[in-house]
Image: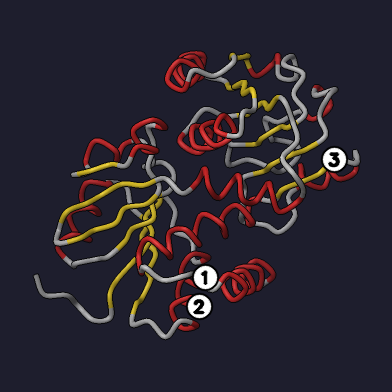
Amino acid sequence: MKHTFPRLCGSVAGGASGLGVKMHNAGYEAKELDYTYIAIGAEDIREVLGSVQNLEFKGLSVSMPFNQEIVSLLDNTNDDVETIGACNTVVIEDGETTGYNTDWRGAINALKETSELDVEKAEIIGSGGVARAIAYGLKKEQIEVHISARSEEQRKELVQDLNLAGEINLEGQGEAGAELVVNATPVAQQPGSPVELEKHENGEWLLDVVFTELQTDIIQEAEGKGWNTTKGWRMLLHQALKQFELYTGEEPPTEEMGRVLREGLEE
């Protein structure tokens, strides 16, 4: 099969973000690679997947709300995707699609930037694709994981699929006594966030997956309580570094991609 030049990569989400565009293109430039990255906002993941195959894309980053839906549309999936039930990265070779999940690596690597991940219990607020990935990563670190979410069906399904410690309704969050609290929802502003830090009496660490701001309201609240915090934009960076490696086969330029991401959020 012939390839288009430059090689195309991109992202698809319900609402397109330019952060990945800036970050990946900066990485390609730093490594002098003939690649270009674009962002796609879409309602139908089937149409997008067919289009990027026809256009001979090399890679596609998949965000909400398509992380779980896309799994059944792929030709191949790696073991992480099979277990998690969600995919955030697609690599295309000779028209064939293979799904990966770099979200769990992004979360764990971002957490370990702060300090050693020395906690026994974690409570994840949310039950979507990102929650699944983080739960998978934390369990690999031998951490007891509890899920708190509005949907009883979704949280029970997640606990069963990944064999987690237990599930709690949203109003009962904090009952697990976890030291690590994870906001795996897209809402971090106060008032309005489903995360109620005051209910987590044993809490000492917050991971917030929201990456659209350098400092979200609940991150500020947690820091005011003296907690360790891990910001969503650091998770975004680390999952993108792994994507860069999958798309190009090259070592990612970490400092350059991190700098450009931070500058993009400061604009």
- The residue sitting at 27% across, 75% down in the picture is 7
Q: Is residue 223 left or right of residue 132?
A: right
**Could you tell me which secondary element the residue under label 1 belongs to?**
helix
Earlier in the chain: of badge 2 and badge 3, it is 2
Residue, disc 3:
227
Task: Look at the numbered disc 3 and give the secondary structure of its residue.
Answer: loop
Tell me the crowding category of disc 3: few under 14, some 14 to 19, or many 20 or more residues within 10 angstroms, Cα based.
some
Amino acid at dot 3: Trp
User: Marks 2/1: CA distance?
Assistant: 5 Å
237 vs 159: above or below: below
- State the scheme by which the image is colored: secondary structure
Task: Report which residue position mark 1 lands on.
Answer: 23
Is label 2 in contact with label 1 (beta carbons under 8 Å)? Answer: yes
Outermost residue toward the bottom?
Answer: 32
Residue 136 position, x and y percent, is: 51, 32
Question: Residue 92 appears at what percent x and percent y?
Answer: 23, 58
Which residue type does callout 2 highlight? Ala
The reply, left or right, for residue 216 in relation to residue 56 is right
Image x and y of residue 74, in percent: 22, 43
| Label disc, if present, on residue 26 of the rendered structure | 2
Q: Tell me which residue sits at (57%, 29%) in the image.
A: 139
Which residue is nearer to you in this view: 114 or 35? 114
Q: How much space separates mark 3 and mark 1, taking CA atoms?
A: 29 Å
- The quarter of the rendered structure image containing the C terminus is bottom right
Q: Residue at x 90, y 41 (%)?
A: 226
**In this rendering, would 238 be left or right of 226?**
left
Up the image or down, 134 lies above or below 242; here it is above
The image position of residue 48, as x and y in percent, is 25, 54
